[in-house]
Amino acid sequence: MVPVGACLGLSAVLFAIGMVGFLGRRNIILMLVSVEIMLNAVNVSLAAFSHRLQDPRGQILALFVIAVAAAEAAVGLGLVLALSRHRAGVNVENLTELKW
């Protein structure tokens, strides 16, 4: 049996990788991948606590998070595809039309 501390350590490392990837990149596709990594880190911690507490609600919530992440990825990639048809690249720095 894997201890909860190891699962939380893995979750923290995954979340940190996702946060650094999100804050350090300017490509929208890589930013979406980083958000998915952070959501998976949350799923690992939910599953670990659910197993520790012998309560299936955490695992059910993790399934809902996976469903929301899939919908977010589909909508995000659709927006990126529509954006790339009108622009040369998908860098965040090129998107200045919505600034104040």
Image: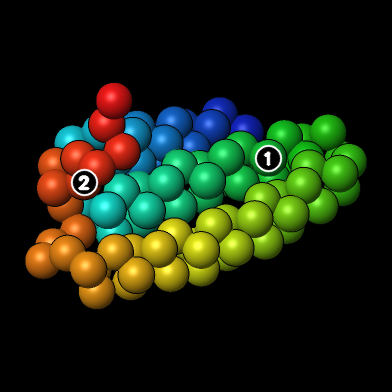
Establish if 94 lies above or below 53. Answer: below
The residue at 34%/70% (across/down) is 82
**Comparing labels 2 and 1, the label whose residue is closer to the camera:** 2
* Disc 2/disc 1 C-alpha distance (Å): 35 Å
The residue at 30%/49% (across/down) is 31
Determine which residue is flagged by label 1.
46
Establish if 83 lies above or below 17. Answer: below
Asked whether 47 or 83 is in front, the reply is 83
Determine which residue is flagged by label 2.
95
Looking at the image, tell me whether mark 2 or mark 1 is earlier in sequence order.
1
Asked whether 79 or 66 is in front, the reply is 79
Is 96 positioned to the left or the right of 45 in the image?
Answer: left
Q: Position of residue 32 (x, y in %)?
A: 37, 53
Is 56 positioned to the left or the right of 25 in the image?
Answer: right
Q: Tell me the kind of residue under disc 2.
A: Leu
- Residue 7 showing in the rendered view: no
- Residue 62 showing in the rendered view: yes
- The coloring applied to the image is rainbow
Q: Position of residue 13 (x, y in %)?
A: 37, 35
On-image quarter of the C terminus: top left
Residue ranking furthest to the top: 100
Q: Tell me the kind of residue under disc 1.
A: Leu
Label 2, secondary structure: give it.
Answer: loop
The residue at 42%/36% (across/down) is 15
Is 19 positioned to the left or the right of 88 in the image?
Answer: right
